[in-house]
Image: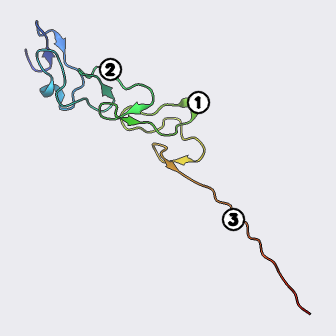
Amino acid sequence: CIRGTYGSGCNETCGNCYNGNISCLITDGNCTEGCTMGWQGAICKSKCETGSYGFNCNETCGHCLKSNNNCSDTNGQCNGGCQDGWTGETCKSGTKTIFYIYIFKLYLHF
């Protein structure tokens, strides 16, 4: 088989292997070093499912807006912004609003 193909007749195209076609086995197309960002499976031909991203889709998306509850399958950036209380490109940094209430007593002596 020429580089980038596999199978009995070398007529199958290798998937999105991490190190390109070098790590695609000519017998079954398995990617020996895993998949590039945004791809998963033994032969790296399946896109990440909604809610996951990264190499072999091993990362979980942050707190993206519910109306567009997905993130980039390569870098995890929330495409439509973050839910309230979350910040950053991947919406994984939380913010807290803290309210301080000061109570004091004032005694006047005459």
Which is more foreground, mark 1 or mark 3?
Answer: 3
Q: CA distance from mark 1 to mark 2?
A: 24 Å
First-in-chain label (1 vs 3): 1
Residue at point 24%, 25% (across, down): 16
- Residue 5, position in %: x, y? 14, 16
Left or right relative to 32: residue 85: right
User: Quick one: SS at disc 1?
Assistant: helix
Q: CA distance from mark 3 to mark 2?
A: 50 Å
| Crowd rating for badge 3 (residues with CA inside 10 Å; few <14, some 14–19, many 20+) | few
Picture quarter with the N terminus: top left
Residue positioned most to the right: 110
Query: Which amino acid type is marked by label 3?
Result: Tyr
- Residue holding disc 2: 46
Q: Quadrant of residue 68?
A: top right
Residue at point 35%, 34% (across, down): 74
Residue at point 88%, 90% (across, down): 109
Query: Which amino acid type is marked by label 2?
Result: Ser
Q: CA distance from mark 1 to mark 3?
A: 33 Å
- Residue 79, position in %: x, y? 49, 35
Disc marking residue 100: 3
Residue positioned most to the bottom: 110
Disc marking residue 33: none
Which is more foreground, mark 3 or mark 2?
Answer: 3
- Residue holding disc 1: 67
| Crowd rating for badge 1 (residues with CA inside 10 Å; few <14, some 14–19, many 20+) | few
Instruction: Tell how many labels.
Output: 3
- Residue 78, position in %: x, y? 48, 37
First-in-chain label (3 vs 2): 2
Callouts 1 and 2 close, C-beta under 8 Å? no
